[in-house]
Image (cartoon, helix red, strand yellow):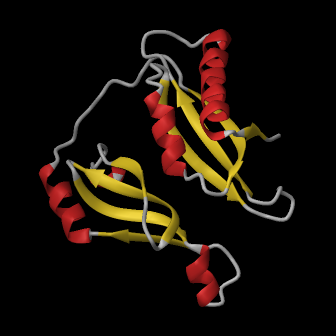
Amino acid sequence: LKRLNLNEVKQKPTVSINFSDAISLELNGKELGIIGMVDKKILKKADVGQDVFYAELNWEMVVEFASQYKLKYKEISKFPSVKRDLALLLDKGISFAELYDATFGLKLDLLKSVQLFDVYEGEKLPEGKKSYALSFVLQNEEKTLADTEIEKTMNELIRNFQKNFNAELRN
């Protein structure tokens, strides 16, 4: 999508009966597609024993938007972004959409993005639990981030997850 100059596509967690975790790709309020992990109940019915990921794009709409957009340039920040990861132990009923909304609900100035990069459900976890690994990008457009600013932001996120989702940090 970025190569088609669709740089303003928003990734929003969404709920779908076919997916256990899904992300909707939206531009100007219109859904361009959906990406997600196929629900385990569907996999079980099909006798599939491993995770399956699925993506569906409305290609006509993608092409339509791509033909409308002219190249836009934005000066690259002189100050680097910082990436931090957290692995959280959560109840199985908690979705990435809930974590995403709670994260941006904090309205943290330094927080630029949050992404889910791993989901683990297995025998090494307590019953009824799953592990989400999240990646956070922090940046200040006006100065280089200090360790204390990064730590403060990450601690706010951790407190939020612990308070609202009874999350535990995993190593």
The N terminus - image quarter: bottom left
**Which residue corresponds to the image point at 48% horizontal and 49% vertical from the top-left?**
97
> At 62% across and 43% down in the image, what residue appears?
134
Q: Quadrant of residue 20?
A: bottom right
Q: Could you say which is closer to the camera, residue 157 or residue 71? A: 157
Residue 110 vs residue 122, the one in the foreground? 122
Above or below for 58 versus 150: below
- Quarter of the image holding residue 46? bottom right
Q: Quadrant of the C terminus?
A: top right
Farthest residue in the bottom direction?
A: 46
Name the residue rendered at 49%, 17% in the picture. 79
Q: Is residue 157 above or below residue 152?
A: below
Q: Residue at x 59, y 20 (%)?
A: 153
Describe residue 52's horizontal placement relative to residue 56 as left or right.
right
Taking 24 as reference, is 137 left or right? Answer: right
23 sits left or right of 126 in the view? left
